Image (spheres, grey):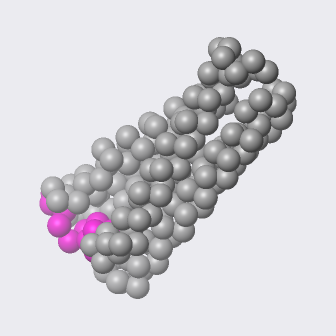
Amino acid sequence: MNNFTTAGVIRRSKILIVLMASLFGLMTLINNFTDYAAYSDYIGRIISMSDTTGNDSRRYRAITSTLFHHRFYWAIITLEIIFTFSFLVGTYQLYRKLCAPRSEFHEAKKFAIIGFSTALFVYQTLYVIILNEWFDMEYSAQRNAFEWARSNIEYMFLGLIYLLVAKDN
């Protein structure tokens, strides 16, 4: 495959998009591990609904168990490890198949697809559905990560669509 064709540029852009998602995952994990206490406290305060206002009728949803808070946070971290590892492997596999026939390059997308899908699960299910909708994260002036989660969902979803739809033969 001639590398300076539209298809070659599209393939390289797909690798770059997966690589950027890998870097995001790595930075997120570094933050989670180097400042575990602050992020764990952040998640715990959302789940315990300790600083939300205007939602008294839904306070029965609050969970004050610090053990649960840590386990929920570790579930997030574990899934972030999975999507970051998948993105890293996906980047490598796509790069290895950069000049391969279309079917081989397409087959190399599987780990990147797993990464995007897992990241979407984390940000849509854990942050938007559970933390925001169930535990009323949007009612917290100090602990509202809804916009952050939404921007991650947008990037991951668009990255997944681009990876799968844009013609790279």
Residue at 52% in and 32% down: 158
Residue 29 is covered by the magenta coloring? no
Residue 45 is covered by the magenta coloring? yes
> Does residue 60 appear anywhere in the picture?
no
**Foreground residue among 63 and 160:** 160
Residue at 61% in and 36% down: 15
**Foreground residue among 140 and 134:** 140
**Foreground residue among 39 and 27:** 27
Quarter assignment of residue 30? bottom left
**Image: 27 above or below 48:** above
At which x and y percent is residue 136?
29, 58
Q: Viewed as shown, does residue 113 lie left or right of 169?
A: left
The span shown in magenta is 41-55
> Does residue 112 appear anywhere in the picture?
yes
Q: Viewed as shown, does residue 160 lie left or right of 103?
A: left
Quarter assignment of residue 95? top right
Residue at 68% in and 47% down: 92
**Image: 70 above or below 4:** below
